[in-house]
Image (cartoon, grey):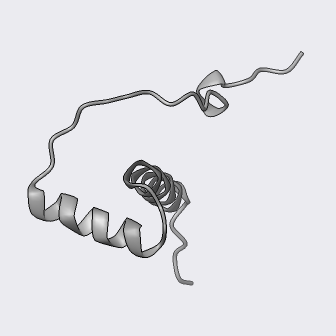
Amino acid sequence: MVEIDLDKIDSKPERINISLPRFILNKIDRYADARHETRSGFISHATVKLITSESKPVETAG
């Protein structure tokens, strides 16, 4: 038997309602448009990248 975290494989889109200041929304839209991405795609990719980078153990010198 193998245990599977269903949260990691459920890729069904879910509509959410969030509020952002207009200047941030404008920045997101310009950035996403320049890369031929949707707003939702950009927010998804940026979120996963940030969570992944902050979840890695911090290496210490020495």
In percent of width and height, residue 61 lies at 53, 82
Is residue 9 rendered to the left or right of residue 43? right
In percent of width and height, residue 48 lies at 50, 52
Residue in the picture at 29% in, 63% down:
28
The answer to whether 62 is drawn above or below residue 12 in the figure is: below
Is residue 5 rendered to the left or right of residue 13? right
Residue in the picture at 63% in, 33% down:
8
Residue in the picture at 51% in, 66% down:
58
Q: How many marks?
A: 0
Q: Find the residue positioned furthest to the top.
A: 1
Q: Find the residue positioned furthest to the right.
A: 1
Pick the residue in front: 1 or 46.
46
Residue 50 location, quadrant:
bottom left
Q: Find the residue positioned furthest to the bottom.
A: 62
Is residue 21 rendered to the left or right of residue 9? left
Q: Quadrant of the C terminus?
A: bottom right
Pick the residue in front: 20 or 2.
20
In percent of width and height, residue 56 lies at 55, 59
The answer to whether 59 is drawn above or below residue 46 in the figure is: below
Residue 21 location, quadrant:
bottom left
Pick the residue in front: 61 or 6.
6
In percent of width and height, residue 26 lies at 19, 64
Q: Quadrant of the N terminus?
A: top right
